């Protein structure tokens, strides 16, 4: 959901940036530019975390997993 919210924020911030630059409202254009930068940074963080995959961190009371030694092929395979 955060990925889509950051995309939505980038779209509106870019639209606002262009609109305020065209109307020569420097303060609002600067604010939209900063919002665009924050949304882009958030988008990059979300994509990075998605590419990392799940990282389950068990507590101290969970024993370590036995390493996967490979299961033998099932019969008829």
Image (tube, rainbow, N blue to C red):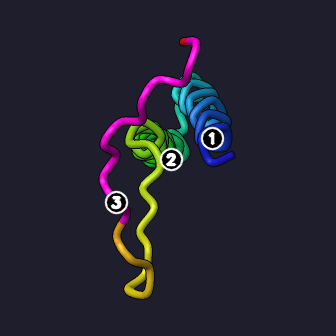
Instruction: Tell which of 49 and 75 is nearer to you.
Output: 75
Where disc 1 sits, the SS reads helix
Magenta span includes 70: yes
Name above or below for residue 39 compared with residue 75.
Answer: below
Foreground tag (1 vs 2): 1
Q: At x 52% / y 28%, what residue is drawn? A: 21
Where disc 3 sits, the SS reads loop
Q: Which mark is residue 66?
A: 3
Q: At x 54% / y 12%, what residue is drawn? A: 77
Crowdedness near tag 3: few (<14), some (14–19) or many (≥20) residues, C-alpha within 10 Å:
few
Kindly report the distance in space between the C-alpha atoms of the residues bearing marks 3 and 1: 44 Å
* Main secondary-structure element of the magenta-colored stretch: loop
Name above or below for residue 19 compared with residue 4.
Answer: above
Instruction: Tell which of 36 and 8 is nearer to you.
Output: 8
Crowdedness near tag 1: few (<14), some (14–19) or many (≥20) residues, C-alpha within 10 Å:
many
The residue carrying mark 1 is 9
Q: Is residue 70 left or right of residue 33?
A: left
State which region is magenta.
65-76
């Amino acid at each position: 959901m955060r990925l889509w919210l950051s995309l939505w924020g980038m779209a509106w911030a870019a639209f606002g940036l262009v609109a305020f630059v065209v109307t020569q409202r420097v303060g609002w254009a600067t604010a939209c530019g900063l919002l665009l930068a924050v949304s882009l940074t958030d988008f990059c963080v979300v994509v990075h975390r998605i590419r990392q995959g799940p990282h389950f961190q068990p507590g101290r009371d969970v024993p370590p997993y036995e390493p996967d030694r490979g299961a033998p092929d099932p019969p008829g395979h």
